[in-house]
């Protein structure tokens, strides 16, 4: 008889609702964690400034550390999100035997490009050859730390990260101070490097115990770079956005050259780094809230979809999920708002505590507000990662990068009393924009979820 | 060169020239029989990952075969249309769906411009699959306020029922003066597109009832989600998503019926089903399948057929040994006949390899009924050799369209006993007044009823006069109404009439 005996079966074969969306929580932790840790580290070392070391030497050392953190984070940002996604997919498919190959592939990429880029840059710096070599090594070690953290946080092993950092940072500080007594800046640098290497080896050991060695090269990861090239860009833009105001200020007319091309902006840097510290509790709290309250409903929402429920109950679940989300954001706002307010009120005292001058107090205050807005922005981006709203994240990261760069540049021209406003307004503009995008996306969540489903 | 090179464009679904079968042979013979007509054709196949080979020696009056793959989705077109236009076009589709719900199918013509994907004015396939407007329409059709069915299954069913349609609606169709679709379904839809796009007449020939066949296939498929328990179906009702699929084929059928200018089917029974399915009675008529009179008329008749002095009475079953032919009913009938007519001998003529398990069961049944000495499975043989021997032909199928064996046997003067399925009654009793006047040429029996079958066989074999009467009627009927050459001429007449019509 006429007609096609087509295998209709085959067509529905692809109906499994693949969602790797959930993997993004872990990306959140590591994209915020590193730069906070770096600030804490500097703060600790800052407290010991002057011990066994002249001011210039200490400042050079400090600049090397800041440059290392800033550019290693921007550099790792290129591969960070893609590897997170890839690892999450491997874990989801229970293909853990390949993870070590992924790690070695990343390592090869990072070391190869890292050596090239950092050597090229430091070649122009007016420091001794030993210092150059040490700086390059430090850069690579710190990159490897970030890389190990990506892999370790994918398996939610935050404990080993924390222990390694506490021990390693302590070792850094002690070794730096001890060695500085003998060989000045180089000693300081070697000491610090020893501590950081300790962190790296701890994390590597932990990784090795979790994922047995396999192949060296992982071809599939490379195909992910092609498939998720937007994630490369997002990671880069996001991290660059965070550092761009500092970079802009280093180029300002009132920035100070320590030795070409290490620059420091005495007025700007301190208050900004200090304000970052105030948002640490909030990030911890938010991640906890997300894990407990929001994630449950988030999961139920997708379970309702895949569990063959009708649209009305899917929409009910979305309502619940969004209510929880709003509650979490509100709680965070109340707590962070209180912390920020207290800090604003006690800014003069705090400034004295962290060795900032009275002239910087208004800057501290505006930076505190900026950081409050920034942490909210950051949370909305985490939520966006949950829903795999990559286009939105891209738009928001881009907005933040552009506004933070341009407004910071503008304030460097406008004068001292405007310092910090660039960062704060950039955060505000990006926050409002992000909130708007999230709102629209939540309205259209079912559409976004279903329209994205591939045909095959 | 005239603008339309080809006279007739045949629209085929999973058949000629890639798949062997009754319909394909029919198409092949039709093309060969009308060398004065310049044919072209489109064959719709499932997907391109399988290698499809041409199985027929294409006649010299058949040109430019085109293939459409139903499930090859080309998503490269990421273009987004103008938003206002998009709104307007989705609105048009909305009205179309609303019209479908009200059983109005002529609206189809108006939505065709939307699917001109290549041109700027059409919606892109991207808009169709992942556009916001299309999503809103999907949601409206689901109706979240009242619908309690699984949304994800609705979504996938909706997507998979619609995706192949895009491939049909946007297909490039060869130009011809007449379009002739050999089924409803996707081929019928393609015919409707051709008719409205090129303003050319559309002829539909339905061998089986496509919608009915699809419905059976769908109700047996377990890949469609059914919210009620899958195993226990007490009331025989089908689930919502099965319904969406059957609705699709119903709709395709109705669109084809409403756009076709002539609807041809093989026999009156099918014509009635088409009318019940919504075909306009005025447009429908019957052109049965014919046989080559010269070939079968040449068979030498057994001069002793049915005579009492014969040593054996030969009863023949012609067909593949498969369950749809209900061979077991035949074997049981054999037992009853053998008890009444010891002279009877039974042939089962046809290939046995298609369903070995069923064949084995048949062999066991023969043994169980102790018929080993009276029954012979011939396997695949030239049936011509047996027609000269047989006294009566028996058909016990549970489903048939227009079985040619009855005509072939009839041409050789062999009366038939056939179950009451498909065109069997018309073939044995006549389908119109003139045909009925010829008289019966066999006996129609109940489906799956060995006793009734046996009774009919005994009636014919134990009454030589009746047998002779049936034999004469059978020959006359085939010669008058089922001559292949005459029937091909009728198609030629229709083609010529359409070709001359100014549209």
Image (tube, rainbow, N blue to C red):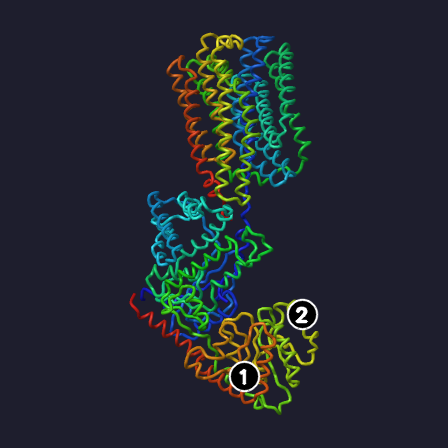
Q: Residue furthest bottom?
A: B309
Residue A163 to residue B104: above or below: above
Residue B472 screen position, x and y as percent:
50, 87
Q: Does A400 sit above or below residue B490? A: above
Q: Are marks 1 and 2 on the same chain?
A: yes
**Distance between the alpha carbons at the discs numbered 1 and 2:** 29 Å
* Left or right of A13, for residue B12: left
Q: Residue furthest front?
A: B235
Q: Secondary structure at mark 1?
A: loop
Which chain does tag 1 point to? B
Picture coordinates of residue B91 (x, y %)? 35, 48
Q: Residue at x 58, y 25 (%)?
A: A140
- Residue A123 x, y percent position in the rendering: 53, 22
Q: Disc 2 sits on a residue from what chain? A: B
Q: Nearer the viewer, residue B52 or B221?
A: B221
Q: Quadrant of residue B330?
A: bottom right
| Residue A239 can be seen in this image | no
> Which dot marks residue B414?
1
Which residue, as the protein is rendered here, is positioned at the far left? B502
Q: Position of residue A410 (x, y in %)?
A: 38, 19
Q: Judge by depth and name the residue closer to the eye, A191 or A298.
A: A298
Residue B360: which numbered mark, if any? 2
Q: Quadrant of residue B81?
A: top left
**Left or right, residue B300 beside residue A421:** right
């Amino acid at each position: 008889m006429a007609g096609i005996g087509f295998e209709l079966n085959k067509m529905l074969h692809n109906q499994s609702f693949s969602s790797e969306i959930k993997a993004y929580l872990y990306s959140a932790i590591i994209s915020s964690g590193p730069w906070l840790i770096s600030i804490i580290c500097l703060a600790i070392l800052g407290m010991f400034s002057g011990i066994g070391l002249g001011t210039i030497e200490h400042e050079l050392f400090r600049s090397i550390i800041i440059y290392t953190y800033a550019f290693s984070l921007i550099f790792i940002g290129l591969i960070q999100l893609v590897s997170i996604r890839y690892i999450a997919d491997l874990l989801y498919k229970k293909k853990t035997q390949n993870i070590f190959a992924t790690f070695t592939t990343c390592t090869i990429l990072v070391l190869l490009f890292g050596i090239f880029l950092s050597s090229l840059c430091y070649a122009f710096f007016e420091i001794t050859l030993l210092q150059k070599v040490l700086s390059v090594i430090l850069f690579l070690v710190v990159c490897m730390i970030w890389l190990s953290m990506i892999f370790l946080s994918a398996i939610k092993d935050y404990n080993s990260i924390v222990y390694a950092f506490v021990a390693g940072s302590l070792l850094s500080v002690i070794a730096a101070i001890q060695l500085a007594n003998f060989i000045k800046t180089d000693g300081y640098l070697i000491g610090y490097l020893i501590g950081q290497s300790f962190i790296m080896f701890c994390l590597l050991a932990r990784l090795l115990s979790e994922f047995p060695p396999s192949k060296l090269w992982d071809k599939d990861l490379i195909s992910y770079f092609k498939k998720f090239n937007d994630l490369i860009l997002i990671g880069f833009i996001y991290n660059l956005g965070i550092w761009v105001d500092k970079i802009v200020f280093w180029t300002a007319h009132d920035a100070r050259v320590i030795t070409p091309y290490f620059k420091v902006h005495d007025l700007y840097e301190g208050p900004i780094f200090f304000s970052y510290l105030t948002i640490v509790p909030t990030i911890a709290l938010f991640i906890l809230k997300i894990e407990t309250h929001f994630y449950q409903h988030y999961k139920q929402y997708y379970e309702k979809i895949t569990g063959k429920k009708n649209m009305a109950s899917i929409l009910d679940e979305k309502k619940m999920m969004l209510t929880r989300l709003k509650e979490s954001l509100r709680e965070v706002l109340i707590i962070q708002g209180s912390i920020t307010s207290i800090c604003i009120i006690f800014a003069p005292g705090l400034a004295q505590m962290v060795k900032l001058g009275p002239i910087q107090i208004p800057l501290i205050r505006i930076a505190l507000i900026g950081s409050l807005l920034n942490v909210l922005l950051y949370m909305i981006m985490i939520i966006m990662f949950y829903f795999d709203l990559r286009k939105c994240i891209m738009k928001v990261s881009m907005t933040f990068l552009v506004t933070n760069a341009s407004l910071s540049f503008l304030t460097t021209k406008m004068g001292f009393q405007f310092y910090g406003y660039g960062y704060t307004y950039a955060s505000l503009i990006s926050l409002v924009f992000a909130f708007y995008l999230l709102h629209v996306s939540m309205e259209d969540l079912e559409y976004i979820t279903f329209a994205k489903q591939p045909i095959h | 060169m005239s603008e339309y090179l080809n006279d007739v464009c045949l629209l085929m679904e999973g058949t000629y020239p890639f798949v062997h079968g009754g319909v394909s042979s029919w198409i092949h013979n039709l093309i060969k029989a009308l060398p004065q007509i310049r044919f072209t054709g489109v064959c719709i196949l499932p997907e391109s990952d399988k290698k499809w080979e041409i199985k027929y020696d294409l006649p010299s009056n058949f040109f430019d075969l085109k293939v459409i793959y139903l499930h090859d989705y080309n998503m490269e077109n990421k273009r987004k249309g103008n938003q206002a236009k998009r709104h307007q076009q989705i609105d048009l589709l909305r009205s179309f769906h609303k019209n479908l719900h009200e059983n109005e199918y002529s609206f189809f013509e108006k939505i065709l411009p939307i699917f001109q994907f290549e041109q700027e004015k059409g919606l892109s396939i991207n808009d169709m699959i992942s556009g916001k407007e299309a999503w809103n329409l999907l949601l409206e059709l689901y109706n979240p306020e009242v619908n309690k069915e699984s949304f994800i299954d609705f979504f996938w069913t909706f997507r998979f029922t619609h995706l192949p349609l895009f491939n049909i609606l946007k297909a490039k169709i060869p130009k011809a003066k007449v379009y002739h679709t050999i089924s409803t379904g996707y081929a019928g839809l393609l015919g409707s597109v051709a008719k409205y796009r090129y303003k050319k007449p559309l002829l539909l020939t339905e061998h089986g009832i496509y919608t009915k066949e699809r419905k059976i296939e769908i109700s047996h498929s377990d890949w469609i989600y059914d919210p009620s328990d899958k195993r226990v179906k007490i009331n025989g009702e089908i689930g919502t998503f099965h319904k969406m699929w059957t609705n699709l084929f119903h709709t395709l059928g109705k669109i084809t019926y409403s756009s076709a200018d002539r609807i041809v089917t093989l026999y009156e029974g099918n014509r009635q089903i088409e009318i019940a399915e919504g075909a306009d009675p005025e447009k429908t008529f019957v052109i049965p399948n014919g046989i080559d009179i010269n070939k079968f008329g040449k068979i030498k008749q057994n001069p002793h057929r049915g005579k009492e002095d014969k040593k054996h009475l030969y009863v023949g079953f012609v067909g593949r040994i498969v369950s749809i032919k209900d061979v077991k009913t035949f074997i049981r009938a054999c037992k009853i006949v053998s008890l009444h007519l010891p002279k009877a001998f039974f042939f089962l003529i046809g290939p046995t390899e298609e369903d070995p398990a069923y064949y084995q069961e048949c062999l066991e049944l023969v043994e169980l009924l102790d018929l080993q000495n009276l029954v012979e499975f011939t396997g695949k043989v030239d049936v011509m050799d047996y027609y000269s021997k047989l006294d009566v032909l028996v058909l016990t199928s549970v489903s048939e369209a227009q079985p040619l064996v009855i005509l072939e046997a009839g041409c050789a003067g062999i009366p038939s006993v056939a179950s009451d399925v498909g065109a069997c009654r018309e073939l044995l009793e006549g389908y119109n007044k003139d045909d009925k006047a010829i008289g019966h040429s066999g006996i129609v029996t109940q489906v799956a009823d060995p006793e009734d079958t046996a009774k009919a066989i005994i009636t014919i074999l134990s009454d030589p006069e009746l047998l002779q009467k049936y034999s004469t009627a059978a020959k006359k009927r085939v010669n008058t109404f089922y001559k292949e050459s005459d029937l091909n001429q009728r198609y030629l007449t229709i083609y010529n009439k359409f070709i001359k019509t100014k549209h």
